[in-house]
Amino acid sequence: MTVGEELHRLVAELYPICRSITGDGVRRTLEVIGRELELQVREVPTGTEVLDWTVPREWNVRDAWVAGPDGRRVIDFADSNLHLMGYSVPVRATMPLAELRQHLHTLPDHPDWVPWRTSYYAERWGFCASQRLVDRLPEGDYRVCVDTTLADGHLTYAEHVVPGRTDDEVLISCHVCHPSLANDNLSGIAVATRLAGMLARSRPRYTYRFLFAPGTIGSITWLARNEDRVGRIRHGLVLACLGDPGGLTYKRSRRGDAEIDQAVAHVLRRSGRPHRLVDFSPYGYDERQFCSPGFNLPVGCLSRTPYAQYPEYHTSADDLDLVRPEHLQDSLEVCWEVVQLLEANRRYRNLFPKGEPQLGRRGLYGSIGGRSDAEAHQMAMLWVLNLSDGDHTLLDVADRAELPFAVIADAARDLERAGLLSSPAAR
């Protein structure tokens, strides 16, 4: 089984679970992730003030359905958790079709798809169905059952920490609040889970903090509870929509020139993969919370086709057929390349900055004579020597020299071994 197939299998296992911003669906999701990673699960009580928000009441579903005039169920939560509007309040009622229609949500442009709708902060109820089904409903009285609870409880999120050799942190975040939506939600969870496992085996320099939290209210809650530690975050990525066939898209942090922005751009440009780099906007996933002006963290967002830009977004068509193993694996590989670049990026200082040091007598020219990349390696050494002033990182050098980061890092290692560069400064 390929890595991509293993990622897809995790997506498939999580797919049937009914998730929302609170409730047992989030806990069940974290239990599945917890088989792969050691999680620190946090429960934050309803009513807790978090920045300008308040943790809402917890929502859980036992059953929900609509029965037609003949008594048969025409819409059933048991068939798909998308059929019930998220956070619907309890209802038991009988009503004519005209009244029922006021509580039905469809997609006329895609008559066979079921939309996903929510009402987190207003007490409503509703059902989602295909336009084709609604068009066939006969006149008559319909029985409605929404067997849900909306009561004081908790908001649940989890963290997994991969300890590094320093306390500086890289934040990797994904949202765990969507129901059966494979690309928007589950693809990011799968990639993050596998990435954490890979990092744990690599003895990283940075400490990596993986956050599995409900969208918006989850990241706001985490920020409110961790204001004293966000200063440790040096880089960050929000992961979402990583399994569809579109090219990769990276949304820069609010800063626009953070090292994570530069690193992802370098990896994507050098990879030859179809991709887009887009500027920050205060709409999207949880990068808008991490990049809010009071925090302004260096956090970008990596996706394939971004939120709301593929037809299947927030519909029943965002299913296990849309998400493909090869795309999940490709997304994971890009994430791995990015974190490996961050791990290797350093600032050096040239110990012989006056004039060009003699490389030949140190064996540096001879050591590359037979290499197929000898010319690139020689130019990389010259660029590293010239820009190693304590201000430029190796990534700065790679971008300025228009050379792959790996070539620059290799040259820096050779120069350091030859005593021409000082050890990297602590960052």
Image (cartoon, helix red, strand yellow):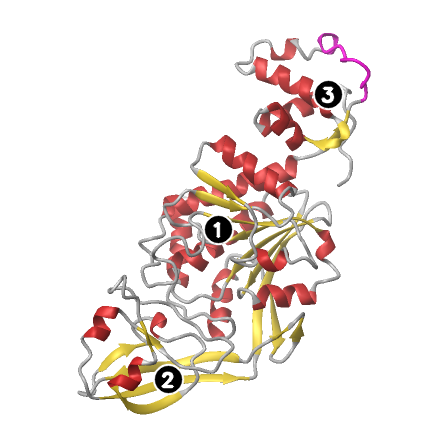
Q: Is residue 310 left or right of residue 240?
A: left
Work out whether mark 2 precedes mark 1 in sequence or the reverse, and give the earlier one. Answer: 2
Assess whether mark 3 and mark 2 are in contact (beta carbons under 8 angstroms): no
Say what secondary structure mark 2 lies in.
strand
Pick the residue in front: 374 or 292. 292
Pick the residue in front: 257 or 316. 257
Magenta residues, dominant SS class: loop
Assess whether mark 1 and mark 3 are in contact (beta carbons under 8 angstroms): no
Residue 346 drawn at (x, y percent)? 70, 34
Q: Is residue 1 visible?
A: no
Work out whether mark 3 precedes mark 1 in sequence or the reverse, and give the earlier one. Answer: 1
Q: Amino acid at mark 3?
A: Asn
On screen, 66 above or below 178?
below
Could you give the CA–CA distance between mark 2 and mark 1, rounded to whole angstroms? 34 Å
Could you give the CA–CA distance between mark 2 and mark 3, rounded to whole angstroms? 69 Å
Could you say which quadrant of the image residue 261 lies in?
top right
Q: Which mark is residue 60?
A: none
Residue 254 drawn at (x, y percent)? 62, 50
Q: Which mark is residue 386?
A: 3
Give the residue drawn at x 36%, y 76%. 84
Residue 76 drawn at (x, y percent)? 29, 77
Q: Amino acid at mark 2?
A: Val
Q: Is residue 372 left or right of residue 101?
A: right
Q: Which mark is residue 146?
A: 2
Could you give the CA–CA distance between mark 3 and mark 1, rounded to whole angstroms? 38 Å
Per the rendered image, the range of residues in magenta is: 351-362
For disc 1, the marked residue is 191
Pick the residue in front: 366 or 112. 112
How many other residues sit within 10 Å of disc 3, few (<14), some (14-19) or many (≥20)? Answer: some
Q: Is residue 337 visible?
A: yes
Say what secondary structure mark 1 lies in.
helix
How many other residues sit within 10 Å of disc 2, few (<14), some (14-19) or many (≥20)? Answer: many
